[in-house]
Image (spheres, rainbow, N blue to C red):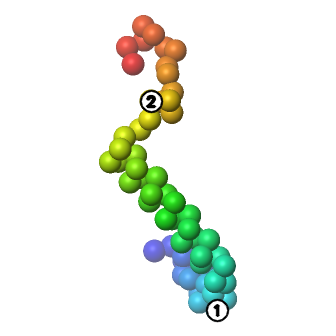
Amino acid sequence: MNPRFFLKMARIARHPPSKKTILLWIVVVTIALILFGVERWIGWPAWLTVNSHRSGIGI
């Protein structure tokens, strides 16, 4: 492991994040998991697909 990782862990142990910060991270991770689940089971909507204008290249 990188020594910076241990320094970061020591800093977090001495000064733990606030409850607001922890709640924010939980909300962000939850939203990401919900989006992943919707994309996985329902599928990616066609209107969000980027159309490639590279015709003839073979991609």
- Of circles 2 and 1, which is in front? 2
Residue 59: image location, x then y, percent: 39, 19
Quadrant hosting residue 9? bottom right
Q: How far apart are marks 2 and 1 (CA)?
A: 48 Å
For the point 40% across and 50% down, the residue is 38
Q: On the image, numbered disc 1 is attached to which residue?
A: 14
Identify the residue at horizontal 49%, vertical 58% (top origin): 32
Query: At which x and y percent is residue 3?
Result: 54, 77
Q: Which numbered tag is attached to residue 46?
A: 2
Residue 51, percent from left and from top? 49, 22
**Quarter-wise, where is residue 11 in the image?**
bottom right
Q: Is residue 20 visible in this depiction of the protein?
A: yes
Report the front residue among 38 and 19: 38
Q: Which residue lies furthest to the top in this view?
A: 56
Coordinates of residue 12 in the picture (x, y in percent): 61, 84
Label 1: state its secondary structure.
helix
Q: Say if mark 2 contacts mark 1, CB within 8 Å.
A: no
The quadrant of the rendering that contains the N terminus is: bottom left
The label on residue 51 is none
Is 3 rendered above or below residue 51? below
Q: Which of marks 2 and 1 is nearer the N terminus?
A: 1
